Amino acid sequence: MTQSGRVDFDAVARAQAQLLSSRRLTTRELTAAYRTVRTATPGAYAEQFVRALISGGYGTDDREARVVLWAEAVEAARQALEADPRFATLLVDALKAYEWGLYDLGRRGEGLVVCEEMALTGRRAYEAGVVHFPSYGSWELACKLAEEGRHREAAALLGPITRDRLIEQSGTVFWPWIAWIAELDAADAGEAARTELRALIEHDRAKAATGKGAMAIVIWELLLLVDMARAHGCVEDTDAAADQVEDLLACLAGSAEARNSSNLLSWWTVLAALTGRREDRPAPGEPEPPVFLDLFWSPDLMRTYLGVGRERLETEVNRLTELAADDPAEHLPHLIETQRMLKLRSIKYWARRRRQGEEPLRSYFDDGVGFARHLNELDGVHGRPALSRALADRAGLSVAANDYAVALADFREARQVIAEHAMSEAAATAAADRDGTRDRAPAPARRSA
């Protein structure tokens, strides 16, 4: 188009010739040619143009420039959708790229609006018969709502996504299902979360029994159930899940599972991270990492969580380690909590790089157990729960490394330690009752289910 706003038909003809030639065009050349042809015929090459713009954005390191390209892709896809409802999926793809670019620049408010448009487009596409499920395009919105701490809204989206995946018998149903469980738990719907987690465990147990899944995943899910049940004070659920973990580990320690766990690390990364979600909370006003899934994290948050945030934790752990060497009674509890946050973040950091097997992580887990043992020697009341948790964490790592016998030993010790803790608390309570001091003590705060 000329500066006067008229169509330059010579330029259009040259662009059309380029597109029809046998020469392979670069993404930039394709984009320019499509753009020129569309000055004469606005609806031409709609899908090719949008795909070229999306590809061009991914092909540049200039973050501002890529957002400009993706904004143009969104506008072109919107125009195409007005003419033909079948272009709904094209618009969703363009919106996915655009929202990622906006979040990459820290423009979170705009990114959330784009996610909302994506979910709305998916619902309209379903109503028009273009896609099979109304949850199409809702994944990103659910994830970003979780980042904003809007857990009930996120769970309300993730439930239908999970049910849709179950209907189509998708092999990837684990991911929305565990995300739904995580958001139910974060929304203080602990009982519903545990119900869904038990259903997921039985689903994956059945898959493993037919050779379509792995018992390692079931063990990690059960370890998460133990953690969730204990956090909500559900003793029977805790014991039942722990019994199942021990039985499976004993079975696998005797005859190692045929399936190699090296391709299952994504499952462990998510399930292990969820056991620390309650402790690793963001500062007020800051977004919350959706540790239940890597794929849809906003890039700015991912950089903070695994970059600057992890480095800060590492520095703090080093500082507390020095302080605890001089005054362990004062500093060990805080060191153990901080080191566990670092450990769980490091799982994700390492899993994204897949370097040197699980060995780079081993020291984090061994250190966690060592710190907890030291605290237990000084203060059993606080040390026993910390040691039990650290041993259970390390059992999960050993499952990832196919060391089932080692995992079994750690898990059995974890159970023994927590049983001793329960007996000690019961004895202390009985003594307080006999002395008449219990009534004078302040009542403990009740946990909400």
Image (cartoon, rainbow, N blue to C red):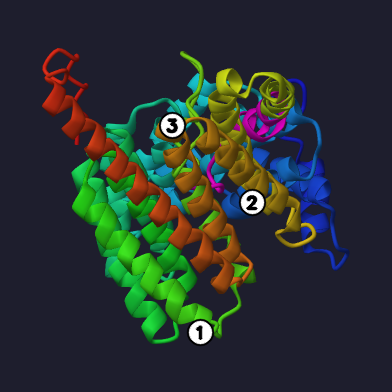
Q: Which is more toward the observer, 271 or 353? A: 271
Residue, x 29% and y 70% (percent of image)?
A: 202
Q: Are marks 3 and 2 in contact (CB under 8 Å)?
A: no
Q: Is residue 321 visible?
A: yes
Q: Which residue is mark 2?
A: 51
Q: Is residue 86 visible?
A: no
Residue 382 is marked as 3
The kind of residue on which mark 3 rests is: His
Residue, x 59% and y 29% (percent of image)?
A: 338
The kind of residue on which mark 2 rests is: Arg
Q: Which is more toward the observer, 19 or 248? A: 248
Left or right for 441, reference 387:
left
Q: Secondary structure at mark 1?
A: helix
Q: Residues within 10 Å of mark 2 (few under 14, many from 20)?
A: many
* Magenta segment: 292-312
Residue 94, placed above or below residue 133 = above
State the image coordinates of residue 381 (x, y, percent, origin top left).
40, 32
